[in-house]
């Protein structure tokens, strides 16, 4: 993803109703672009990567030829969307009042 | 959930486009109602419960007062929706060609 694409992606997702924050990070968790403060950024990226990796390993346990692409979890306090691409992880945090 | 509610829930979810199967199980994984064969039912309920429990513990690690309510994961081969209520777990398996 080029720098412009990263900005466009963040702007596009951040524009959705109820989105509290958008983070694009490298696959190791190093934030590249964020709309959140540092503490929240580190917290949500860490949670997203841990969630994704635990679920990925489980999906692969069942079928090694399968791969996890996207996760959406709703908790009592927020909704988290996690999408993993080749080199990046995209995390969006949404207010549960605005979700489907 | 009464027996009628269980049947209605299964019929309602099974009616959505691309839904491959719907399973309602007790929280320990014992299937109560399923539209799938036994092997698939056991496989998807097991995967759903393991996913949910791993993610729940992670959400609670971050914030003990929070709780996981719903999960949607998209893999290369299927999409899995997992909703946990008081005594039941509801699992829907969807063909990825029909998802958002």
Image: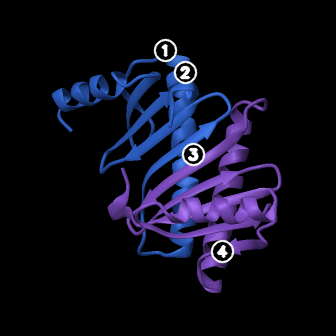
Chain colours: A purple, B blue
- Are discs 4 and 2 both within one chain? no
Given the image, what chain letter belongs to the residue carrying mark 3? B
| Cα distance in 3D space between marks 4 and 2 | 40 Å
Identify the subunit bearing mark 2: B
The part of the image, by quadrant, that contains residue A8 is bottom right
Rounded to the nearest whole Å, what is the CA distance between mark 3 and mark 1?
A: 20 Å
Task: Please state which of the two labelled residues, at mark 4 or mark 3, is closer to the viewer.
Answer: 4
Q: Circle 1 is placed at which residue position?
A: B37
Q: Residue at x 74, y 66 (%)?
A: A25
Mark before the other along the chain sequence, 2 or 3: 2
The residue lying furthest to the top in this view is B37
Q: Nearer the viewer, residue A95 or B66?
A: A95
Measured as percent of width and height from the top left, residue B98 is found at 51, 27
Q: What residue is shown with label 2? A: B40
Rounded to the nearest angstrom, the CA distance separating label 4 from label 3 is 31 Å
Q: Position of residue A15 (x, y in %)?
A: 49, 63
x then y, percent, for residue A35: 60, 76
As displayed, is residue A22 above or below residue A60?
Answer: below
Asked if the residue at tag 1 contacts the one at tag 3, i.e. Cβ–Cβ closer than 8 Å, the answer is: no
Marks 4 and 1 close (CB-CB < 8 Å):
no
| Separation of residues labelled 2 and 3 (CA atoms) | 15 Å
Q: Which residue is mark 3?
A: B50
Quickly name the residue at label 4: A34
Q: Secondary structure at mark 1?
A: loop
Neighbor class of circle 3 (other Cα within 10 Å; few <14, some 14-19, many 20+) is some
Instruction: Answer whether labels 1 and 2 touch (C-beta < 8 Å).
Output: yes
Q: Is residue A2 above or below residue A21?
A: above
Q: Is residue A74 visible?
A: yes
Residue B36, given in percent of the width and then of the height, sits at 46, 17
- Check whether the beta carbons of the residues at disc 4 and disc 2 lie within 8 A of each other: no
Position of residue B16 relative to residue A70, above or below, is above
Q: CA distance from mark 4 to mark 1?
A: 45 Å
């Amino acid at each position: 993803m080029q720098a412009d694409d990263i900005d466009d992606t963040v702007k596009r997702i951040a524009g959705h109703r109820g989105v509290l924050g958008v983070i694009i990070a490298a696959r190791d968790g190093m934030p590249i672009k964020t709309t959140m403060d540092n503490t929240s950024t580190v917290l949500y990226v860490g949670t997203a990567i841990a969630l994704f990796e635990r679920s990925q390993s489980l999906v692969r346990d069942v079928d090694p030829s399968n791969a996890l692409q996207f996760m959406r979890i709703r908790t009592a306090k927020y909704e988290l969307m996690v999408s993993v691409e080749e080199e990046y992880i995209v995390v969006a945090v949404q207010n549960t009042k605005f979700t489907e």
